[in-house]
Amino acid sequence: MLSPTGGTPSTEPLLRIQAVQIQPGAFISQTVPVNPGCCYTLSFAADVRDGGILVASVSFPALGQDCPPTIAEIIADDIPHIVPSSPAPQSGFQHFTLVICVPTGIPVVDTACITFQNAATPASPGGSAFVDNIVFQPTGGPCDSCTQNF
C-alpha cells in the first residue's frame, strides 16, 4: 500500500499516512480569498470506506450560503459539489477534481468556503472518509487576475 504522502508504510515503519479522517456527521472547512469571474479547480485524494458519504463543496458566504453548508443547502441552493465514491469498502485513495467559477455582480463574492463533510449518519459503523492532498488553485476565466493553466 502506497501512502498518499509517499513511501510504503509496511517497509518504512516510521511513515504514517497523513490524511485527515472525517467521521460520519463530521466536517472540515476553510475559507479562502477568490476573485469574481475567475475559475478555480479543487483537487484532492479521497478514500471513502464502509458506507461513508463524502461531499466536497465550494460555497460563497457573500451569496448567503453557509460555511459550511448543510447537505440540504447544497442541493437546494445548487452549490457546486462532488460526491466521490469508492468501488469497494476499502479501495484506497483516488483523485477527484471539481472546477468552479466565482459569480460576478452584486454582492461582490471575494471569499469561498471549501468544505469536506461525511454525510453518512453518525450511527454508521466505520463509515469514514479520508481526504489528502487538497489543492485549490486558479484555473482561468474571464478576469485579469487569473491565467489559463491548460
Image (cartoon, rainbow, N blue to C red):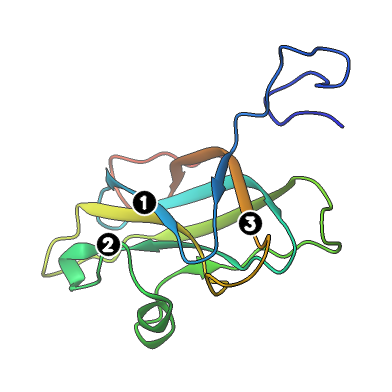
Q: What element carries label 1?
A: strand
Whether 54 is drawn above or below 74: the answer is above
Relative image position of residue 121 (x, y in whole percent): 54, 75
Q: What element carries label 2?
A: loop
Marks 1/2 in contact by CB < 8 Å: the verdict is yes
The Cα atoms of the two marked residues, 3 and 1, are separated by 17 Å
In the rendered structure, the answer to whether residue 148 lies left or right of residue 102 reads right
Question: What amino acid is found at the position of numbered circle 3 in the picture?
Answer: Ser
Q: Nearer the viewer, mark 3 or mark 1?
A: 3
Residue designated by label 3: 128
> Where the N terminus falls, by quadrant?
top right
Q: Which of marks 3 and 1 is nearer the N terminus?
A: 1
Q: Which of 69 and 102 is in front in this view?
A: 69
The Cα atoms of the two marked residues, 1 and 2, are separated by 7 Å
Q: In which quarter of the image is residue 73?
A: bottom left
Q: Which of marks 3 and 2 is nearer the N terminus?
A: 2
Q: Residue at x 24, y 71 (%)?
A: 65
In the rendered structure, the answer to whether residue 87 lies left or right of residue 135 reads right
Query: Residue 67: which disc?
Result: 2
Whether 89 is drawn above or below 77: the answer is above
Residue designated by label 1: 29
Q: Quadrant of residue 67?
A: bottom left
Q: Which residue is drawn at 19% across and 52% down?
A: 110
Q: Which of 92 and 64 is in front in this view?
A: 92
The Cα atoms of the two marked residues, 3 and 2, are separated by 22 Å
**Mark 2 nearby-residue class (10 Å; few <14, some 14–19, many ≥20):** some
In the rendered structure, the answer to whether residue 60 lies left or right of residue 142 reads left
Relative image position of residue 14 (x, y in whole percent): 71, 11
Whether 75 is drawn above or below 24: the answer is below
Question: What amino acid is found at the position of numbered circle 1 in the picture?
Answer: Ser
